Amino acid sequence: MTLQPYRTLIVLLAAQCFGQTAAPVLVLVGGLVGAQIAPSANLMTLPLAVMIIGTATTTAPASILMARVGRRLGFLVGSGLSVLASLLAAWGIYQQSFVVFCVAAFLIGGYIAFLQQFRFAVAESVAPDEVPKSLSILMLAGIVAAILGPEVGRRFSFVDGLPDFVGSFLGLAVLMAIAFLVLLMFFRDTEIKADAVAGDERPLGEVLRQPAVILAVASAVVGYTIMSLIMTATPVSMHEVDQHSLDDTAWVVQSHILAMYIPSFFSGFLISRFGVMRIIQAGLVLMLICVLIGWGEPRLMHYFGSMVLLGVGWNVLFLGGTTLLTQSYRASERFKVQAANDFMIFGWQAVGSLGAGVLLATLGWNGVLAFSLPWLVLLIPAMWMVKRARVLTNA
């Protein structure tokens, strides 16, 4: 069997193994840096929120850039930005400047907007029936990032002669440079395969009003918002509030990130076997169980169990939503729909991340969990709309 049809998948998988470490590093140490240099305790998770705001605000420019100059140049611009952002973060910590650190977090978020386009580049390079499996394979890069990112952040957090956590971001800059080199040397733009849905380009509003698109976007938005809310609060709640060690905190964060991506070994196959709707329903149930396990006065294993289920729930909701989205637009509509989808995902994720610090400081850990419940309810009417539309179509 030749690997040539999967060249794009292989190259982007390799680049994402290094590029995707940006978020885990910032998740692990961003709140801890904020606790040290932020002017207020309520702002200690602001860098993580700013990172997500950076992603949300860069989705449209990233998509427009790639529509004009191609995926390759767009990915190289994003990767170059990530190296600059990592060095700027290190400089901000060295200067004890919370503002500079937040600017760096914003730029890292901008890079993530480019990184998110990897999944659409892969979907465009394979046959429609191979999209779920190919996307799940791409998401396996998160396993490497889950191990490598926090490990670099932890091992280089304390370097002689440097303020705490400066080394974490110098190490991140090296990882980002490797991702850049992989793209520079091996990635090439590919022709877009014929879309399964032919037809003229429709207005964006018309596309977004389709029940399938509503559910696709809602699944990813809910998954990302709840994941961001709880994940952002966890390191601070564990290390600063409940006084768990940095090693224990890093272990829980690594376990969570691994749980986000290990299901990719089989989630794509499950979508092909059982369908997108059942996978999204499973994600809803997993998120509810996550909240139940973490509720109360959590000990180490409660944090661990809750974060693992949070990761698995995110995986199936995000992969299910992305697969459903790629089935719901035409090739000519892809850039604008992808940009709108990611803007909504990361815009609301920013709300979850920013709300984590405020909720944790005012209502505590249980307040964070309680705030996630209304988001899960949103999936129920979206699922009903899709089911009703399918019944009417088949009538």
Image (cartoon, rainbow, N blue to C red):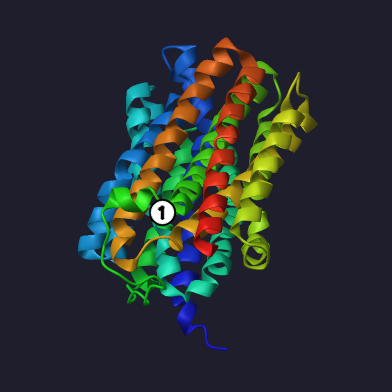
Q: Nearer the viewer, residue 163 or 332?
A: 332
Query: Residue 336: x, y in percent?
Result: 29, 54
Which quadrant holds residue 140? bottom right
Q: Which residue is mark 1?
A: 115
- Check the image and report above or below for 133 versus 152: below
- The quarter of the rendered structure image containing the N terminus is bottom right
Residue 277 in view: yes
Up/down of 294 relative to 325, above or below: above
Say which element carries label 1.
helix
The quarter in which the C terminus is drawn is bottom right
Q: Residue furthest front?
A: 395
Residue at the spot x=33%, y=61% of the render? 334
Q: Find residue 294 and report its horizontal and vertical position in percent.
A: 73, 28
Q: Residue at x 46, y 81 (%)?
A: 5
- At label 1, the amino acid type is Leu
Give x and y (percent) for residue 229: 55, 30
